[in-house]
Structure formats: C-alpha cells, structure tokens
Image (spheres, coloured by chain):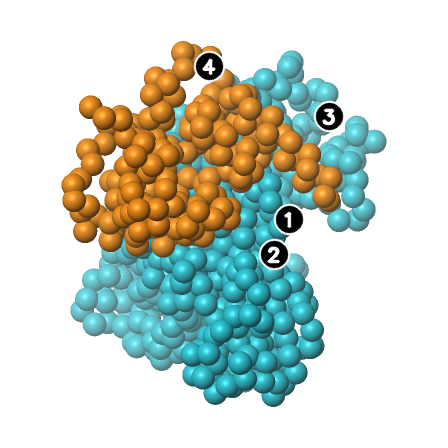
Chain colours: A orange, B cyan
Amino acid sequence: MKNLLFTLGLSFLAFACGNPENDGTDSSAPPQSMIEDPDPGIATGKGIGEVKTVELTEPLNQDMLEMGESIYQMKCAACHKLTDQRVVGPGWAGITNRRKPEWIMNMITNVDIMLAEDPEAQKLLEECLTRMPNQNVSVGDARDILEFMRKNDVEKVGERDQAVEEG
Amino acid sequence: MIRLLPTLFLCAAGALGLFTACDSANTENVVNGDVAGEVYVPPGEYDEFYAFLSGGYSGQVTVYGLPSGRLFREIPVFSQYPENGYGYSEETKPLFQTSFGFVPWDDTHHIELSQTDGEFDGRWLFVNGNNTPRIARVDLRTFETVEILEIPFVAGLHCAPFITQNSEYLVSGTRFSVPIPQEDVAIDSYAENFDGAINYVSVDPESGEMTLAFQILVPGFNYDLARNGKGKSHGWSFLTTYNSEQAHSLLEINASQKDKDLMAVVNWKRAEEYLEQGTFETRNISYSHNLVDESSGIATSGEETSVRMINPADAPGVVYFLPVPKSPHGCDIDPTGEYIVGNGKLSADLSVYSFDKIQQAIKDENYEGDFEGIPIISYEAAIEGVVKEPGLGPLHTEFDGRGNAYTTFFISSEVVKWNVETKEVLDRQPTFYSPGHLVIPGGETTKPDGKYLVAMNKITKDRYLPTGPELVHSAQLFDISGEKMRLLLDFPTKGEPHYAQAIAADKVMPNVKKFYALEENTHPYVAKGEGKAKVERDGNEIHVYMTAIRSHLAPDNIEGIRVGDEVYFHLTNLEQDWDVPHGFAVLGNNNAELLVMPGQTRTLKWEPQRVGVFPFYCTDFCSALHQEMSGYVRVSPKGSNVALKWGLNENLSEKDMLSQAEEDGDGSM
C-alpha cells in the first residue's frame, strides 16, 4: 500500500509540475485541455479568477473579520492553522505578507482552476500533496475571510498586507 | 444454444394456438445493421433520458440512462442498504417504522413520477411497497427517499401508487382482500367477511408530503393495477381486479372461472363531494407516517390514527364496475384520456373501452346487474372495440403520442404495436423472454416522447454469460420512432423490475443538488467546523461530534469509552463540493458503515463489546491520503476510570481535559 501511495503522490507531482490536465482522481475541475495564452493574473501574482482588484479597508472592518472568522471555523480550520504550522494546508500566519489579496481570494473561490493553471498554487500542491477542496465560498465570504487573515497576521507576525504593491 | 431457446418458447406458444413471431425470433434476425452507434453515448456526454426502474424484491429503485442502458444509481427505498448506511444510520432508521414495527424490506413494483397538467414535472418519484403496504416518496433533487406512508386496512399494495394528472392523488387498491378491520375468522368465510379498499393519498403541491385522504370500501376482490383519467377523463380512476369468484385457495384455477372479471371505475371528484358533505365513516386504526426533515436530514416516524372511509352504499355514483375479459392485469389510458385498455391475461383479445361511452352508459343506467349494490356497466355499451388476437397473455400497454399503443405479451413473448383508433396490429417484435411491463418515456402521460421503448423481461435464460441458477433480469431497448420497432440493446437490471418510468433528462438534471450547505444543516449533533468536534458522555451514552474533510477525521483519538457504553458517532462531512462523500466504519460494529454526503451529518451507533483499541476509518477513497484517514478509539472495562479524552494531532496522555473530567465525575486526570 505504501508503494501505491507513493506512486499516487508522484502522479500528483507530475501533474502539479506543469501538466494542466485534471488528475482525475481527486477533483471536479473541468479539463483545461485548450492551450491558451497564460492568464495575466499569473504574471501579476493576482491569480486566476473573477477577483481582479481588492479594496483594502483601513482600519480593519470588525463585522467583516468576525464573519470571516466564523466561516474560517466552519470551512477552513480543519486544514489551516492560524500559526505558521502546516497541517494539511499551510498555516495562515503572515499570509497577507506573502500573497496578494486577489490571489488569496481567487485561490479560495476558484481553487480548481488555480490548481490547474497557477504556478504558485501548484507549488503549494507539491508541498502539501492534498488538493485544496472547493468549499463553495462566495466572493463576498472570501473577502470576509481575507479581513480575518489580516487581523490574524497582525496578531501573529506584527504586520499585514506586505504583499500589496504600492500605487 | 442461443437459437435453441427462443425456438422452444415459440413452439410452446405455437402449441397454444399462436403463430406470431415464429420465423423472426432469433437475435441475428431482429437486430438489423450496425445499431451500436444508436445507443452509444460517447465519454463525457449524457444520456437523453433518465429511466427509473422498480427493483421488485430488492425493495429499491434503480436509475438508468437511455439509450445507453447504463446504471447510474440504486436508490434505497424499502430495504436497508449497508452500502451507504440507509436504514442503519440513526437518521434513516425511522423510515422503516410501521404498525408492525421495524420492517427493513419490501417489494417495489410501480414507479410513478409527479405530474403537472398531465406531464412529468421532475419533482418526485413515488413507489409502492407491496408486502407491508406502503408508499414512498423520493425527492428528485437528491435522489433520496424522504417519506414513507403506511396504508392501513389493505394487504399487498400491488395496485399502487398511480398518480393523477396534477399529482392530486396517488391511487391504490388492495391486492389481497382481508377482514376490515382485521379479525380472527375462518379463511373460507372469505365471501362473507373479506373486503377490499381503494385508497386515495393526496400529495401536497408544495412539499410533496403525502396524506391518506380517504378510502373506499369495496367488495373482496384482488385489485391489481390502475390508471387515472386524464384530459376529458380527469377525475376518474380505473382499477382492474381479478378473483371476482372470491376464491381463497388455488386461485390459479378457482379465480379463473369466470369469462369476465370486473374493472372498478371510480369518480373521485364525486367522492370529494361526499367527503365535504360528511358522508363518510371515521375508522380508527394506527399506521405509520415517516418523514425526513430536509435541513437536519433526520427522519421521524409519526403515528396516524384514523382514516375517512366511504361506503359506496351510502355514496351512489362513486364506484361502478365494468366487465373485462379473463383475469385482467394492466389497465392503461391513451394520451387523449378517451380510450381505456383492459388486458385480460388469459384472453387473446384486448378490450378497448370509450370514456364517452362509459359516461353515456352511466347516464342511461345501462347496467347488466350489480355486485353488492355496485352497478355493473354494460360491457356492450362501454366497449369501443377489440384488438383481435394480437398475441397471448397481454399485460401492459403504453402509448407513443402518435396514435399507437404498444402492449407486452407475456406468453407469446413479444411487444405488439397497434393503432388505437383502428385496433389494427401494425408490428410485432419478439422479446427475450416474456416481458412484464414496458415503458416509453412519458408513455402514460398526455405527452409521450415516443422515441424509445424498454421492455422488462421476466425470463433471461441464455441472454448473458451464465452466473449459476440465479440470473439478472434483462431489459430490451427498442427504437419506436419509425413504422417498425427496432431492437437496439439488451441491458441487465437489478432485482426484478416491474414498472418503470422514464423522463427527459433536462426535466431533472438542472435541479439536482450537488451538496448540502453546511450553513443550513440543523442536525442537533452537527459539528460546523473542526473546532466544534468533541465527545460528550451522558450516563452510558457517548456522543462523538466528529468532522471529516480530506484527509482526516476529528477527533481521531478517543479514550474513556467503556464496555457497555452506547457510542453515537455523529459524522459531519465538512466538504462543500460535489462528489466528495466520506465514509465511516469502526471495527466490530454490528450494523453497517456510514456514507456521508458533503455538508450532511449522519450517525452510527456502536456498542463496543470488548476491551481494547479499535480503529475507525473513512471508507470512501476520497483523496491521495485517504488511507491515512483513520483513527483509534480506546475501550476500557466497565467501571474503568480512564478519563474521557479526545484529540487530533496531540498526545492524549499529555492533554488536560480537567473540566470535562470533572463534569463527568471521573476526576481521574
């Protein structure tokens, strides 16, 4: 059985290293068989999906971050810790300093396409070996989760939003 | 061999005076050209129709695609289904409750899809339980059984659950007449003491919830099959019966004595008027009504205690009888609602009645006597015409919407196409072998989709690679779009399909639910998030609020369980994506597994018998790390003071759960 799993793991890796085809075992992602120009979101680091720009609130919006925390508890906490500890998925501490807000929200709301096409998302899959599930989070709910992440970053690493470019 | 058996069959038919399809009976002759492309659905494409087949003695319903004949799903209805825990999980057990207690099996016969304006609307599927009289409702958004209603005062609910054109009622009748109410009497007092009942179950147009609206007390015959009028005949029901001889033993001889049996003709709109006027008797009797609450997914079993019974003696104009030759079985009504076909099993002819003529005969009181006061309409006055010697052993008829009818003939093993107006036989094709029901998509509605016909055969013999004495039943798909029927495909089925209904996929597919929203889950033991996972003790009851997501269960280490405890694993699947069920099984459990859909909570009861450490695991290969999705539960002796502890990714020995232990009175941290 160990051998089987190792083989499976390898096929995931192979897939994650650039083959945009659905792996077929673990996902409901539609096959991306058309070879098209890469999505501009890949070059800008904003990821692929309907989230193109995010207006960040200053100061943090209390209602949003509370809503974000409750969604986190229900749909995300099983795999993501609020520290930097990776369990199933990466820990969230410092995430807004590493990833642009658009990338984060696209990863949450458009995960199957992100795992198929976005090189940064694919790197995470290589590390974690479990595909992030589509938890059917709306863009509005993803925005609330982002607010909660920003608060968490302040608490855990002392700063937030460092991945946002000036201007 | 492949040619030998059909020959045998047809020779037997020939000996009975039949000369039907003798010269075209082998497969090589009936399949013309390359028909494979006509049933081939390329990878990634969908079938055009859903076909829902009853499972007979399997107690279930199966879902096939047409024209491919591919099996998509078995929907568990009246039988426990260890494959997903249906009837084993705490949430679904109450569906099996009846006035006889827990009855985990039944015999499904007739599928009826809900209708609006005489067409299928794709909302619900209804099916009968024959043995312990029940009707079930399946929600076609989830393909799950959501309601089961027991029908009192009847025995053998074969004649069920036939639907009216706006789903006002599901009409049924007793197959076996019995004393009403039941009493300890001599069996040979049948004629004196046994009665039948015709049952009208109403369907709530919004929720689909069923209610036994009323019953009609009728003579003690065997009520066999039924259809409801449509269009001009809407408001009337037609039920075939056999055994007007009222035999109670050796029915095959003693119930086949008379030339004609009787079809019950019921004016249910008239019955509604009597109900409104209070012309009914309230009969007290206990029967079960089991209903699933949609947001929690929990079934509860309720008790109904009375029914309104109409006695035709007090309510003239509600029930009539109509003579039908020789032990009729199927009773089918053409799409216009004008023609009613009675199929006498032992007759060589088909009788076609006219609704208009029936109405005229009633108006003129053109009766040929009565049975226990119920008028018998003159056969001559009601008959529209006879299809002469179309085959032997006619059972069931469906329609193509182009003026043609298709009837199965059990004994001569064929489907016969005939014109409803002219009664002329147009085509006949052999089936392999001995068909019972047949189905055309929408074939009993006002708008049949006359492209395909499926014959469901009772005998399989040499059609497939042999599998010992027990064989699957075989269905056969015909293209009926042209003048002649063309056999396209054989496909195996599950259990023993009786009736089936088929519906255009686009009436069902857009409404199919992909997962249950966690936010809407109101199960009292839901854990909406891993942070809510916990274990509680209440006396010897243990409740584990467990969550599942790829690829772990939480908690996955549990200690402090004792022999003699009743452990309830309440597993919430935290996934919110399509097709990601998680399963749950624990070593030594005496019932089944759980299969939990995304966003759903399901409960498995486990009564550990031995001291030790027992693994549990996810049974559905959910991810690359599925094999890792497991855990341990430690079982200590009765009276042990090992503290109740649980966790995930931590050592319980180092974990302080003092507050819980204190509440528990163990204090053994």
Q: Residues within 10 Å of mark 1 (few under 14, many from 20)?
A: some
Question: Which residue matches tag 2?
Answer: B630
Determine whether the residue tagged by mark 3 lies in a helix, strand or loop: loop
In the rendered structure, which amino acid carries the disc numbered 1?
A: Gln
Mark 3 surroundings within 10 Å by alpha-carbon count, few (fewer than 14), some (14 through 19), many (20 or more) = some
* Distance from Cα at disc 2 to Cα at disc 3: 55 Å
Dot 1 or dot 3, earlier in sequence:
3
Which mark is drawn over residue A34?
4
Q: Quadrant of residue B64?
A: top right
* Residue that numbered label 1 is attached to: B627
Subunit of mark 4?
A: A
Other residues around mark 2 within 10 Å, as few (<14) / some (14–19) / many (≥20):
many
* Residue B611 seen by the camera: yes
Q: Residue at x 19, y 66 (%)?
A: B276
Camera-near label (1 vs 3) is 1
The CA distance from mark 1 to mark 2 is 7 Å
User: Mark 4 or mark 1: which is in front?
Assistant: 1
